[in-house]
Amino acid sequence: IASGSIARDFYIPSVTPVGAGAGTTVTDLTAQASRLSFSAERGEGADKALGFVEMDFLGSMQGNERVSNSYALRLRRAFLDYKGFRIGQEWSTFQNTSAIPESASFLVLSEGMSFVRQPMIRYTNGNLQVALESGNATITPGAGAGRIEADGNLIPDVIARYNLSGDYGNVSLAAIGRQLRLETGATDESTFGFGVSASGRIKVGEKDDIRFNAIAGEGMGRYVGLNALNGAALNPATGELEAIPSYGGLIAWRHPFGETSRFNVGYSALFADNPDFLTTLNPATTQSVQSAYAAVLWDIAPKVTLGVEGLWGIKTLENDTSGAIQRFTFSTKYGF
């Protein structure tokens, strides 16, 4: 994985090398995951307005490791809350953030996870949330390889989610409908995509919990697996777009022990049911991505956490070739 790639900072399933020859091992040290946030509010009760902005340095391409390691801030989240509406950039309504497994790195088990931050207009009424969100689609071109980011959608992505919570923890049920449109030169094709998701965090015993996400649909693309699969592919024989079906999920167990430590372990996978024409044009199309991890975290002082983690990932192509990656992370975090 190239030195400047964001995949050196955390695990991205689609970037796992396949057929790249002899393996290699590298060590990176970074503070780019450091994060800052600011909030302000005015008014009271139903008239209260709240603004929030959050930034970090992860993925910045404006720095290097030669002398100063100076990296620029990037926008993570920025929104306004007022009378049930949230307008701005935020975690997608299709995602339940409480289902994200605890880890020593920035992110694990992303294959079967919905993980998206983007601009939206969301309305919340009790347990129900509905939203219009950014409709950018990722398309496999007619050559059967590569990726086109198509942002010519007329219709934004439409998402609904229902949240349940109680002494047992929380569960969210979500559904998405989206237009997948490719408009390049003489080509103006579109198709429909959809997906459903069940996710949450369930308490087990006094301190343990199980975190999970089950997800399936057609044309979900970037909404699952950090865009390990595209949303649709262009069939050169018919000139039409076909949504790519996929399904997957994750499960993780968090087990506190002692007074300040906890052990985490989990598994995640995403599988594609690629159209026949796509596997014929490009046998190196991704068929599946899977990973498992284990992590121990220890609070050595108030709000100061040390972590150690091992992750094993595998990517398999339609021609049955595969590649694997092992990541070992040691981290220190101070929350303030």
Image: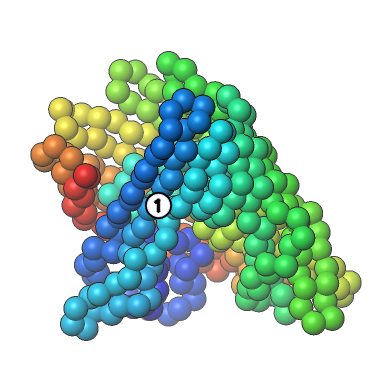
Residue beneath the point at 61% across and 37% down: 123
Q: Spot the residue most to the left.
A: 301
Please give left or right for residue 21 compared with residue 282 in the image.
Answer: left
How far across and how far down the image is residue 96, in percent?
A: 50, 38
Q: Which amino acid is tagged 1?
A: Val
Q: Position of residue 158 (x, y in %)?
A: 70, 46
Q: Nearer the viewer, residue 39 or 119?
A: 39
From the image, which quarter does the N terminus lie in?
Answer: bottom left
Circle 1 SS class = strand
Color theme of the render: rainbow
Q: Position of residue 78 (x, y in %)?
A: 46, 52
Instruction: Please tell me which residue is depicted at 82% across the width and 76% down the height of the picture.
Output: 187
Q: Nearer the viewer, residue 314 or 131?
A: 131
Looking at the rendering, which quadrant does residue 328 occupy?
A: bottom left
Viewer can see residue 178? yes
From what the image shows, is residue 96 above or below residue 221?
above
In the rendered view, does 106 fall on the left or right side of 88?
left
Query: Looking at the image, is 327 positioned above or below residue 53?
Result: below
Q: Is residue 31 above or below residue 173?
A: below
Using residue 302 as the reference point, say whether residue 71 is left or right of it: right
Q: Nearer the viewer, residue 193 or 146?
A: 193
Circle 1 residue = 53
Quarter the C terminus occupies: top left
Would you identify the image quadrant in which residue 62 lies?
Answer: bottom left
Report crowding for label 1: few under 14, some 14 to 19, many 20 or more residues within 10 A (C-alpha): some
**Which of the pair 302/130 is nearer the observer?**
130
Q: Quadrant of residue 100?
A: top left
Is residue 326 among what the camera can see?
no
Q: Position of residue 301 (x, y in %)?
A: 10, 39
Q: Please state the total of marks drawn on the protein image.
A: 1
